[in-house]
Amino acid sequence: MAKQDYYELLGVSRDASDGEIKKAFRGLARELHPDVSEAPDAEARFRDVAEAYEVLSDEDRRARYDRFGHEGVAGQGFHTERFMDMGFLDDLLGSLFGGGFAGATGPEAGADAQTAIEIDLAEAATGAHIDLDLELVTTCEVCEGDGAAEGAEVRTCSECEGAGQVRQVVRSPLGQLVRTMPCRNCGGRGQIPDRPCPDCRGRGRRPQRRKLGVDIPAGIDDGQAVRLTGHGHAGELGAPAGDLYVRVHVRPDERFVRDGLDLVGHLDLRLSEAVLGTTRTVETLDGDEQVEIEAGLQPGSVLVLKGHGMPRLRGGSRGDLRLIANVQVPRALDADQRKLVEGFRDLEAERNYADPERSRGLRDRLRRAFG
Ligand SMILES: [Zn+2]
Ligand SMILES: [Zn+2]
């Protein structure tokens, strides 16, 4: 019987990514593994699928298979020495079935922890040191993590006779496999205290409130997280701790909205300021700055303050602060003021309003808003 196409066996396309291939194999192996499946042909199918995976998960062999078909990888598949190598098979089965496959997994590693903080925009721009106060599973201080009560007598584990590991026979499509696993009874340490630590009930860790400082890097954006490696929940009996993820929320700022690295705000100008020009003091995240308002500044003009935006996360250049001019039209004029404006009306000329930039600017803004 002709051999079935490896891609078809796994049910993936020929351009499937490594991840897709792995996922497909994992799913099929869960379904077909002889320890799980009742189907009479499960074992044969498992072998075929494992062979397909063995070839397609290897870049070189996959390339050869793509060019030459089964001939190109003959003698290099599932039944080769490489595959029979226990270490490899162990990895493969482990990656497929996780710790659950063969039972004991040794001391449990710590879980990742999560917390959230709120900072304001100025802190996001400069970076900030934040003190956290949170509940974490931490190493038990009473027994220093070894799980033994004070003065407890430490005995050799009867299960593994002090080796910390047990051999376990596992049924597999290749026959019986012997796997070496951490001893579950002693958590892989080979020794057990006769009385467990009363504070942590022998687990070596327990939930506690902890204070922890975190440095938030300059330039962080709303919703991003900072990872503190190894600062999550403590592992059991010396197993590695998880990571702590600190999600950062940046409070909305009344003055500026972030747009990439730039900040955008607006600047209210009186009609007289826009018409005559002036120097104005404006607020930035770095303190007050002076900007020149040119005579005849049009509403909607953008004043750019270079380098007063947000910094790039990994250092380097800063964005700009863009201020949109909002020209205010005076209201509630008294008689004298009205007379002055009427006087201007009588004198104004076409050239006062002939500004191609303005109509173009408006068109652009409309396009940006609705385009
Ligand atoms: Zn303890
Ligand atoms: Zn043991």
Image: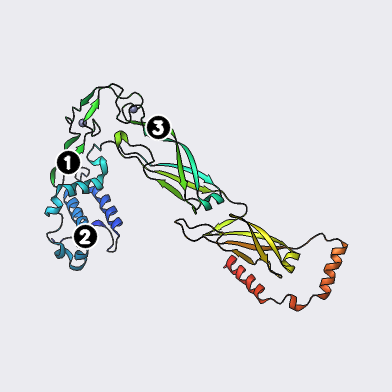
What residue sits 78% from the left and 62% below the top?
330
Residue at point 73% right, 75% down?
353
The quadrant of the rendered image in which ligand 2 is seen is top left
Judge by depth and name the residue closer to the eye, 145 or 65: 145
> How many numbered discs, if any?
3
Considering the numbered disc 1 on the image, is that residue within a helix, a strand or a loop?
Answer: strand
Q: Pointer 2: what residue?
A: 6
- Is residue 33 toward the left or the right of residue 305 in the image? left
53, 139: nearer the viewer? 139
Q: Are marks 1 and 3 in contact (CB under 8 Å)?
A: no
First reached walking from the N terminus: tag 2 or tag 3: 2
User: x, y percentage for residue 132?
Assistant: 47, 39
Q: How many neighbours does mark 1 have within 10 angstroms: few (below 14), some (14-19), or many (20 or more)?
A: some
Q: In the image, is residue 265 above or below residue 199?
A: below
Amino acid carrying mark 2 in the image:
Tyr
Q: Position of residue 121 (x, y in %)?
A: 56, 51
Q: CA distance from mark 1 to mark 3?
A: 34 Å
Ligand 2 is within 8 Å of the C-beta of the residue at disc 1? no
Give the residue pinned by disc 3.
207
* Residue 273, above or below 201: below
Question: Residue 267 is drawn in which quadrant?
Answer: bottom right
Q: CA distance from mark 1 to mark 2?
A: 29 Å
Q: Could you tell which of marks 1 and 3 lies nearer the N-terminus?
A: 1
What's the amino acid at mark 1?
Answer: Arg
Question: How far apart are the alpha carbons under marks 2 and 3?
Answer: 49 Å
- SS at badge 2: helix
Q: Which residue, given by chain and number where applicable, does mark 1 sit on? A: 179
**How many C-alpha atoms fall within 10 Å of the one at disc 3: few (<14), some, or many (≥20)?**
some
Q: Secondary structure at mark 3?
A: strand
Q: Label 3 is placed on what type of residue?
A: Pro
- Which of discs 1 and 2 lies nearer the camera? The answer is 1
